[in-house]
């Protein structure tokens, strides 16, 4: 899920150049904001939101529970569906590439869902400290 953070921050910095890109920009923007609200510690470190909302999020701690993981996966499924509704042939090349990369991150994370309950063990394991398994 760390890869998704990097991708959504990069996508959110793309700017809003062409009017034909408005639909994909709305999906990128909404996903970025929803993902950061669901992950307040990431929102805190990125200082993405305006001051008032940022202060509210700074006061929250991210849960690391099965329910929180399920909420994250549900959000990915929702935006995977939203992204698939956008006609990528009508958006700029850079947005099309960003959408494909984000779709790939969604696909890979959701494909790994059966293993997500083991991510703590793999990410904290001392058997390979320089080659951690990191789920998107």
Image (cartoon, rainbow, N blue to C red):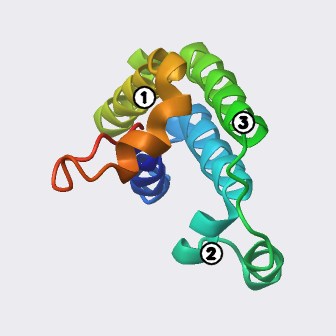
**Callout 1: few (<14), some (14-19), or many (20+) C-alpha neighbours within 10 Å?**
many
> Which mark's residue is nearer the viewer, 3 or 2?
3
Residue that numbered label 3 is attached to: 66
Q: Are marks 3 and 2 in contact (CB under 8 Å)?
A: no
Q: Is residue 19 above or below residue 5?
A: above
Q: Earlier in the sequence, mark 2 or mark 1?
A: 2
Q: Earlier in the sequence, mark 3 or mark 1?
A: 3
Q: Cα distance, mark 3 to mark 2?
A: 22 Å
Q: Measured from the top left, where is residue 58 in percent x and y? A: 73, 78
> Would residue 80 be found to the left or right of residue 4 on screen?
right
State the residue in front, 72 or 29: 72
Q: Measured from the top left, where is residue 35 in percent x and y? A: 65, 48
Q: Cα distance, mark 2 to mark 1?
A: 31 Å
Numbered disc 1: secondary structure: loop
Residue at 69% over, 24% down: 78
Q: Measured from the top left, where is residue 53 in percent x and y? A: 80, 74
Q: Cα distance, mark 3 to mark 1?
A: 37 Å
Residue at 62% over, 36% down: 27
- Location of residue 84 (image quadrant): top right
Residue that numbered label 2 is attached to: 44
> Would residue 21 be found to the left or right of residue 77 on screen?
left
Q: Are marks 2 and 1 in contact (CB under 8 Å)?
A: no
State the residue in front, 48 or 15: 48
State the residue in front, 25 or 106: 106
Residue that numbered label 1 is attached to: 91
**Callout 3: few (<14), some (14-19), or many (20+) C-alpha neighbours within 10 Å?**
few
């Amino acid at each position: 899920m760390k890869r998704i953070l990097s991708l959504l921050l990069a996508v959110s910095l793309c700017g809003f150049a062409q009017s034909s890109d408005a639909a994909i920009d709305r999906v990128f923007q909404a996903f970025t904001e929803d993902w950061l609200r669901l992950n307040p510690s990431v929102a805190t470190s990125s200082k993405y939101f305006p001051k008032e909302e940022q202060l509210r999020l700074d006061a929250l701690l991210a849960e690391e529970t099965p329910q929180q993981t399920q909420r994250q996966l549900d959000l990915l499924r929702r935006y995977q569906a939203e992204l698939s509704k956008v006609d990528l042939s009508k958006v700029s090349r850079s947005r099309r590439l960003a959408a494909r990369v984000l779709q790939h991150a969604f696909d890979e994370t959701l494909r790994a869902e059966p293993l997500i309950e083991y991510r703590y063990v793999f990410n904290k394991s001392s058997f390979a400290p320089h080659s951690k398994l990191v789920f998107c």
